[in-house]
Amino acid sequence: MLGLVCIGLAGCESRQPSILLFVSDTTRADAVSAASAPTVEALAAEGVRYRRAFSHAPWTLPSHVSLFSGTLPTQHGVGARSVHAPESLEMLAERLQAKGYQTIGLSENPWVSSDFNLDQGFDEFAFIRRTSHDRFRSSLDEALAEVDPDRPVFLFVNVMDAHEPYRHVDGNPFAPPSLSPEATNSAARRAEQSMCQADADLRDQAVAWSLYLGGLSRADRKLASTIDALQARDPSRELISIFTSDHGQHFGEHGLTNHLFSVHQELLHVPLVVHGAPRTDAVEIDEPVALGDLADTIVGWAGGGREPLPTRSEAGVVSELTEFETLGAHAPAVAIMARARGPCDRSAPVFGDMRSLIRYPLKLMWFSDYPPALYDLSADPTESNDLSGRRAEDARRLMGELETRTESLARVEAPTRPSRGPSDEVLQRLRELGYLEAPEPTAVRP
């Protein structure tokens, strides 16, 4: 299944490759293994695995805009000034469309939808609810039904199987066998609500982690089906398959759950595997890379280029989080920040804006409301030992670099507010995921 089907067929090398960009939402790098993601591991065995890939934001919307546009959150402003991607951004799908690609998007995440203008450049873009493998495959086949076999395809897929809420699903090989489905779900609910609680039950977090791994395994099965579907439509065309994630997830580390309150490694360090790109040998890359560099690299491959994804050993990787409150009137009411304000003390660095600069092995974390922190990721991958006091010169140097990098960026003009808000379907899905407040009861007139 994973081999280059094109090998040995005449004329194959002159044709543009089809390209798959598959995002398993909320998947941290250390969750991927032969047990949880065998398809990903098979791709990595034949392709390129990036051991230190980093997202530019710890939640879906700004991360995807950076992935598609190659710009930092400070530049595009999505997640800070607006929840709608500016029309002036040149997105990956638009650039591939200009190169003759058929561009198709399939997303289970309501943030990644036309409601927030993330369908720019796609000929077809469908938002579907998180669903079973069989229903996903049906939606995929429908999306590919009108594909012209004489033209290359760019297919973007986002699946939500690894995203909370975490609940029992039959057939999950990672679920604790000693717990009933009801007990499993109760433990997962407690884990999801244990943010900033010093006495949070680690057993509950372990249960949630087991459900998370089960979700990743379901996402991996969807990845295999997607590759099969693309190769079946045009067996003679090369296929470049890219597997990654937009961000990770906390499971009690640093006293946190979810993925909206930090720029720690659990959220920024994501898997990245590339299969079928113009590189001959399977290899693992240890130098840091940034997801924002994928757009330029993919466009280069589409045009016949052979340049690999650039490494960031010298430039470093910047990531950013803007507190939800600053969205103001640009966004619907947000429930997650309100939930945090209960258990989280103001002394905990989970409020306000945050940035990080990873110049491996050093990582600087800047907070608008708290002192900065410095970590040596090679010796302290869990970020448990703040070195900002003992290595003050390194902290000052990286702080100056971070300020220079972000202040010198040209901001993209924020879009005017759309004439219509998100659809009822998208709002309901965001509500189910915990992003929105439940609507106030409406009085019924007699």
Image (cartoon, rainbow, N blue to C red):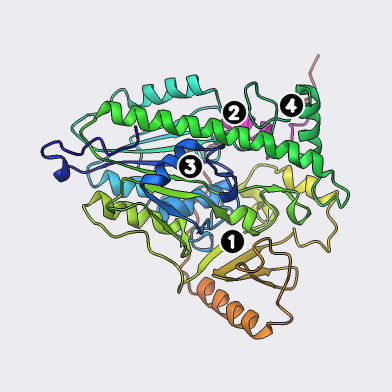
The magenta stretch spans residue 429: yes
Instruction: Please determine whether, in this image, residue 359 is positioned above or below residue 425.
Output: below
Callout 2 amino acid: Asp
Comes first in the chain, label 4 or label 2: 4
Label 1: state its secondary structure. strand
Label 3: state its secondary structure. strand
Q: Which residue is mark 4?
A: 177
State the mark number for residue 424: 2
Residue 312's x, y, as percent? 45, 67
Which quarter of the rendered picture does the N terminus lie within? top left
Instruction: Please determine whether, in this image, residue 364 is positioned above or below residue 400.
Output: above
Q: CA distance from mark 3 to mark 1?
A: 20 Å
Q: Is residue 442 left or right of residue 296?
A: right
Q: Residue at x 87, y 52 (%)?
A: 198
Which quarter of the rendered picture does the C terminus lie within? top right
Q: Which residue is mark 1?
A: 320
Q: Which residue is mark 3?
A: 23
Q: Spot the residue most to the left.
A: 10
